[in-house]
Amino acid sequence: MSEKTILKLQLPTDPLWVKNVVESNIEELLTDHAYCEQKAATNGITLIVQNPNLSDLVQEMIALVQEEMDHFKRVHEIIVARGFVLGKERKDNYVNELRKFIIVGGGREAQLIDRLLFSAMIEARSCERFKVLSENINDTHLSEFYHELMISEATHYSMFIRLAKKYAVEIDVDKRWKEFLEYEAGVIQNYGKSETIHG
């Protein structure tokens, strides 16, 4: 899988992030990852609450929430099995910076499409990070785990893009997605230096 062709991310993660940052503090990575899964489930619930009239979206989000909570459970099981504890929630500066790009106001359609593309962007970067982890981490169990989750995140990314195109009437989704990609490239330049999924 090439991030350029499938995910279209403009700035790839340096594999040295795994060797120089992540491997020295697996506990921190796992705690952050657990909360990322929980937040992804919360995002799905928010989309349901905001769009209860869109039955297809509601059905897709129900499945997403169940899958993300299953991932949360599995990450937590790894944490416990390794003698760690979950720890407190970590702040996700990357996601908070990305959120600033979402249109505030501008009508329901614009808000929905931007929320879906924001969600797709996080899934795309998580997928890319999981790929880098699976290929570079010196831990067979985690390598296999992150390979599996990479495929799952790619599916979620595709789903959010598909839903955005389904519900867009006035908005050019491809154009707006390109704007998101360009904005994300500027944001991600400041990351890849800490032992967090987006850090």
Image (spheres, rainbow, N blue to C red):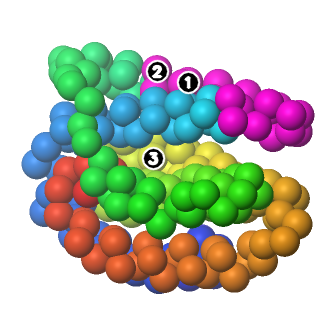
Residue 70: mark: 1
Image quadrant where residue 104 sits: bottom right
- State the predominant SS element of the stretch in magenta: helix
On the image, numbered disc 2 is attached to which residue? 73
Task: From this view, report whether residue 45 is shown above or below residue 12.
Answer: above
Question: At x 28% / y 54%, what residue is drawn?
Answer: 93
Please rate how many residues cluster around mark 3, counting C-alpha atoms within 10 Å: few if below 14, some from 14 to 19, many from 20: many
- Could you give the CA–CA distance between mark 3 and mark 1, rounded to whole angstroms? 14 Å
What is the three-letter code of the residue carrying label 1? Asp
Residue 158 or 50: which is nearer the viewer? 50
Question: At x 85% / y 57%, what residue is drawn?
Answer: 167
Q: Earlier in the sequence, mark 3 or mark 1?
A: 1
Residue 146: mark: 3
Image quadrant where residue 118 sits: bottom right
Tell me if residue 101 can be seen: yes
The reply to whether the C-beta atoms of the residues labelled 1 and 2 are less than 8 Å apart is yes
Tell me the SS state at disc 1.
helix
The C terminus - image quarter: bottom left
The reply to whether the C-beta atoms of the residues labelled 3 and 2 are less than 8 Å apart is no
Tell me if residue 71 can be seen: no
Q: Position of residue 151 (x, y in %)?
A: 61, 52
In the rendered structure, does residue 57 fall within the stretch colored magenta?
Answer: yes
Q: Is residue 37 left or right of residue 52?
A: left
In front: mark 3 or mark 2?
Answer: 2
Range drawn in magenta: 48-73
Question: At x 29% / y 38%, what residue is drawn?
Answer: 32
The N terminus - image quarter: bottom right
Q: Position of residue 172 (x, y in %)?
A: 78, 77
What is the three-letter code of the residue carrying label 2? Lys
Tell me the SS state at disc 3.
helix
